[in-house]
Amino acid sequence: MKPQDSKSSGQISSQTQEIENTNESLENLPASLEQLNITKEKNIPFSHEELKSIITRLEKDIADGSWITNDYANTDFKLMPALVEQANAKYPELCLKFAINSQDLCLSIKEAIENGVQSSRYIVNMKEKGTHFAVIDHQAIENKVSLIFFEPATFNSMNPAMLALRTQMAIQSQLPNCYFSMVEMDIQRSSSECGMFSLALAKKFHLEADKLQKIHKDNINGVLCKPDTPLPSHKLDQYLPPSFYKHTQGKRRLEEYIKSNPVAENEKVNKKDETLRERFEKNLVTTQEEKTVSVSTHRKRVREYKSLMM
């Protein structure tokens, strides 16, 4: 048999490698298609690899401390529809909606009322000069509708104040028979965790809806706060259970809540039987600016994003 020359051997070797690569690609195709289908089914605007890369960056930011100043709100905005959809799938009676504007919010609330929904939640947002989120809890009590706007930070900044004002004006105009009030939790310290706070609170509002009956009753009876005046955090604390403060980022704020609610000192707030202070200490980190804050909400973002890949 005539031996092959080196040129022919090279061509055959190259062709063999191409065939092996093709076979390997075909073997991986089902997994790739499955990942693609997952992102499509869950209304995720990123590919599987893009989302994986985003999560890797989030984890890196936690490791180097840059999470405290980095902006993630725009990514949260893009993923919020999928996160809300996933939350509703996990908790069928959650009745959570992501309202992209005031008109959408009012239409969604009106629809819930007309359908006899007794309790629902709404994540609201604005995108001018930076994205900001807040969450509204709705409860119907004796045929009266109470709507309470929860701000995770305070109303001292422009975006939270503007979002609250727009929401208030829209509801007073389009849903005049509803009882609307605004409250500030003052549990956010980092720059862009408002979306994660809003999502976490919405779930808590559903799971512990009975703990919110008093605040809704006081809202309907007109004794929660003065008209058109937000309820400050130190007055809000007496209404809410410890579990609502799981992700509080500042130590001083956490101590304020515990001081006003001594029973919260030893109450367990999660499945690990941790108290608020124990959980806070476990998530405490020191930033590059030598600030000590809880990274709990940012870790929650990582978990939420990862769950979209499953």
Image: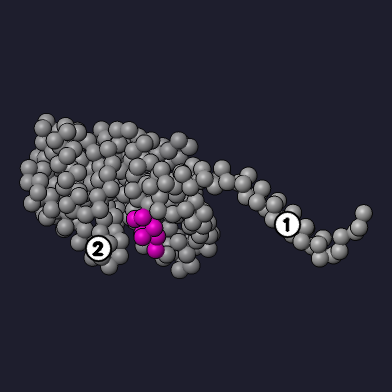
Q: Residue at x 90, y 59 (%)?
A: 3
- Residue 207, image x, y percentages: 32, 35
- Residue 32, image x, y percentages: 54, 47
First in residue order: circle 2 vs circle 1? 1
Q: Is residue 167 left or right of residue 295?
A: left
Which circle, 2 or 1, is nearer the viewer?
Answer: 1
Q: Is residue 113 magenta?
A: no
Q: 184 or 122: which is nearer to us? A: 122
Q: Is residue 15 left or right of residue 213?
A: right
Look at the picture and state if 89 lies above or below 168: above
Look at the picture and state if 173 lies above or below 30: below
Look at the picture and state if 115 lies above or below 191: above
Q: Secondary structure at mark 1?
A: helix
Q: Using the rendered view, name the quadrant where residue 46 is placed.
A: bottom left
Q: Using the rendered view, name the quadrant where residue 87 is placed.
A: top left
Q: Residue at x 76, y 61 (%)?
A: 11
Q: Is residue 306 visible?
A: no
* Alpha carbons under labels 2 and 1: distance apart: 60 Å
Q: 118 or 112: which is nearer to us? A: 112
Q: Secondary structure at mark 2?
A: helix
Q: Is residue 106 left or right of residue 295?
A: left
Q: Main secondary structure of the magenta part?
A: helix
Looking at the rendering, the stretch of residues picked out in magenta corresponds to 71-78
Mark 1, Cα crowd under 10 Å, few <14 / some 14-19 / many 20+, is few
- Which residue is labeled 1 in the image? 15
Q: Is residue 74 magenta?
A: yes
- Which residue is labeled 2 in the image? 159
Identify which amino acid the numbered label 2 is placed on: Asn
Q: Is residue 200 left or right of residue 209?
A: right
Q: 36 or 192: which is nearer to us? A: 36
Identify which amino acid the numbered label 1 is placed on: Gln
- Residue 90, image x, y percentages: 38, 35
